[in-house]
Structures are given as C-alpha cells and as structure tokens.
C-alpha cells in the first residue's frame, strides 16, 4: 500500500503536497522524508512535469511596451506561467511584502533567488519557494568591510554535490576580482582565494548564466572575447575562447539551449534590409559548434 501511495503522491505538484501534510502524521512523515523529496524532484525533472515559466511582463499583455521606458518599467511584474497553457497562474509578490522592484538571479527546482534590482555588496539575498510561500534569508558575508563597485549574482542546483549554490562575483575599481560561493546545505558563504591571473580583465557581469552548478560569464581581454566558467562544486575556473566570428560584445548573449551552453550573436545591419541576422553557437566538449543562422 505504501508503494501505491508514493506512486500517487509523487505525481502531484508541491502546492498540493503541502496541503496533504496536515492529513495525518504518516502522510506528513512520508512527504517530508528526504527519500520522497528526492523521488518527487527526480520524477519532475526527468519527465518535465509541473514546469513553470518565470516571466517579467507588463500586466496588459496586448500592450506594446518599451522595456527601457522607466515609467512603464515600474508597472512590470513577475509571474509564473505553466508551460502547457502559458496562462498566468500566479503573480509573484516579494515574500517580505516589499513594493520596490526586485531582481531574480536564478531559479532551480522551484526555488528562486531574489535580491535588489541594482546589486550592491550588502544587498539582501533570499532563496524563495513561491509554491509554498517559504523563504530563507542568506547570511551576510564575512567580508562586508570590503567595498566593491561591481557585483554579479547567480543561483542554481549543482547535481554533482547535491546542493544549491549561489555565486557572487565582485570587482573593485582597481580591477581586483573576488568570488564568493554560498552553500544552502551549510548556510554559509566561502571566499574563493585562488583567482587565476588571466581574470584580470573586464568582466561583463550583466551577461552570464548558470547551468548544472557552473557559472558562466563573458569576459574581454583587449580585443579578445572569452567565456569564463566557474564550477561552484570543485571551485575551479576555466577559460573558453569565443568563436573568431564573434568580434563584439554588442549583441552578444550567453544562455542555455537544449542542455548546452550557447552564444547568441545578433548581427545588426544584415544584408536583408530591415532584418537582423542571429548566429547561434553551442558548446560541445569545450568546442563551439555553429548551428544554422536565422534571420
């Protein structure tokens, strides 16, 4: 009977499971057990069930808006949309009730990392589960006295160490780079001491992504563009040279495409009048493969 019950419960979304915690003690113990949580998560990930899209949008979907308009931007809101219907199902409000705009710096398995829209070194960071309306405030760093002018923040799950990680990269006016890693298991920050010398360059902290426990950033050293990767588990840095065809930071974006790191390079002023050409490169075994460009 227990196996049948588990097979039924693992198919339910987290919000329904939370309600069943108060059904009886045996159900509460079962749903709260680490084995059930892992089974439920594994099933959702492998079968892509209960997947939601996290979108920043204007309340009026039919209105064409300029995302750079400061007045319209104040009206934007974060919402969850189920991937099957793409109908707004849940409007996200800050868990502390704050009305100011906030930024989302990564999400994984239902957890969302939020902080100030404009990051400072002492910006409060929260890991939030909107489905069950619970959150955790991350502790302040022990390096709070150091003043940094540039801060980047990323968050996600590292399957290799079975832990959720937040990576914070900071730079001073003198181009000194500092990297801190937060572990949800330990609930603490760790400063990374060994920074490779090739990272003394311009870090494009606005253009980065986090995938499978690794933080990726576009960096520039003189005329050369590279991708810096930092594994939040092994705490190792790597440099991946960008394709020769990519010659400018303008129009260059890094993200994940079909479980692979990709570079999207938008070429303005395409031969077709009024059109833009986009080149897509995916990283396969530390080499770039160009997919068919599209216009």
Image (spheres, rainbow, N blue to C red):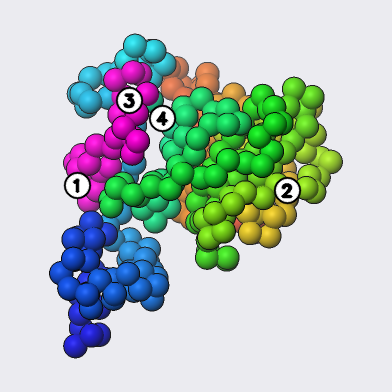
Instruction: Give the overall secondary structure of the magenta segment.
Output: loop
3D distance between C-alphas at marks 2 and 3: 34 Å
Q: Are marks 2 and 3 in contact (CB under 8 Å)?
A: no
- Is 197 left or right of 258, judged from the image as shown? right
Q: Are marks 3 and 4 in contact (CB under 8 Å)?
A: no
3D distance between C-alphas at marks 1 and 2: 43 Å
Q: Which residues are magenta?
A: 73-100
Q: Quadrant of residue 236?
A: bottom right
Q: Nearer the viewer, mark 1 or mark 3?
A: 3
Q: Are marks 1 and 3 in contact (CB under 8 Å)?
A: no
Q: Residue at x 23, y 56 (%)?
A: 15
Disc 4 marks which residue? 102
* Mark 1 crowd level (few <14, some 14–19, many ≥20, 10 Å Cα): few
Q: Are marks 2 and 4 in contact (CB under 8 Å)?
A: no
Sequence-earlier tag: 2 or 4: 4
Q: Residue at x 69, y 27 (%)?
A: 147
Sequence-earlier tag: 1 or 2: 1
Disc 3 marks which residue? 99
Disc 2 marks which residue? 192
Q: Was residue 12 drawn as part of the magenta stretch in this picture? A: no
Q: Nearer the viewer, mark 1 or mark 2?
A: 2
Disc 1 marks which residue? 85
Q: Nearer the viewer, mark 1 or mark 4?
A: 4
3D distance between C-alphas at marks 3 and 4: 9 Å
């Amino acid at each position: 009977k227990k196996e049948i019950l588990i097979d039924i419960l693992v198919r339910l979304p987290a919000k329904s499971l939370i309600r069943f915690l108060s059904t009886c003690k045996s159900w509460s113990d079962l749903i709260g057990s680490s084995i059930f949580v892992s089974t439920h998560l594994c099933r959702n990930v492998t079968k892509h069930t209960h997947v939601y899209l996290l979108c920043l949008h204007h309340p009026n979907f039919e209105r064409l808006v300029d995302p750079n308009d400061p007045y319209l931007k104040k009206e934007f809101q974060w919402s969850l949309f189920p991937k099957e219907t793409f109908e707004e199902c849940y409007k996200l409000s800050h868990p502390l009730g704050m009305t100011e705009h906030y930024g989302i710096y990564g999400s994984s398995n239902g957890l969302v990392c939020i902080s100030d829209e404009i990051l400072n070194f002492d910006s409060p960071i929260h890991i939030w589960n909107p489905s069950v309306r619970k959150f955790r405030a991350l502790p302040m760093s022990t390096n709070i006295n150091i003043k940094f002018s540039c801060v980047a923040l990323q968050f996600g799950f590292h399957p290799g160490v079975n832990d959720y990680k937040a990576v914070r990269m900071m730079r001073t006016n003198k181009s000194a780079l500092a990297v801190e890693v937060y572990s949800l298991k330990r609930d603490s920050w760790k400063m990374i001491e060994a920074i490779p010398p090739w990272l003394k360059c311009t870090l494009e902290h606005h253009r980065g992504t986090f995938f499978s426990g690794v933080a990726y950033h576009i960096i520039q050293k003189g005329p050369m563009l590279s991708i810096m990767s930092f594994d939040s588990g092994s705490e190792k840095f790597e440099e991946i040279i960008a394709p020769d065809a990519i010659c400018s930071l303008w129009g260059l974006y890094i993200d994940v495409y079909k479980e692979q790191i990709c570079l999207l390079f938008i070429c303005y002023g395409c031969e077709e009048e009024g059109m833009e050409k986009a080149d897509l490169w995916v990283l396969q075994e530390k080499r770039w493969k160009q997919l068919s460009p599209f216009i």
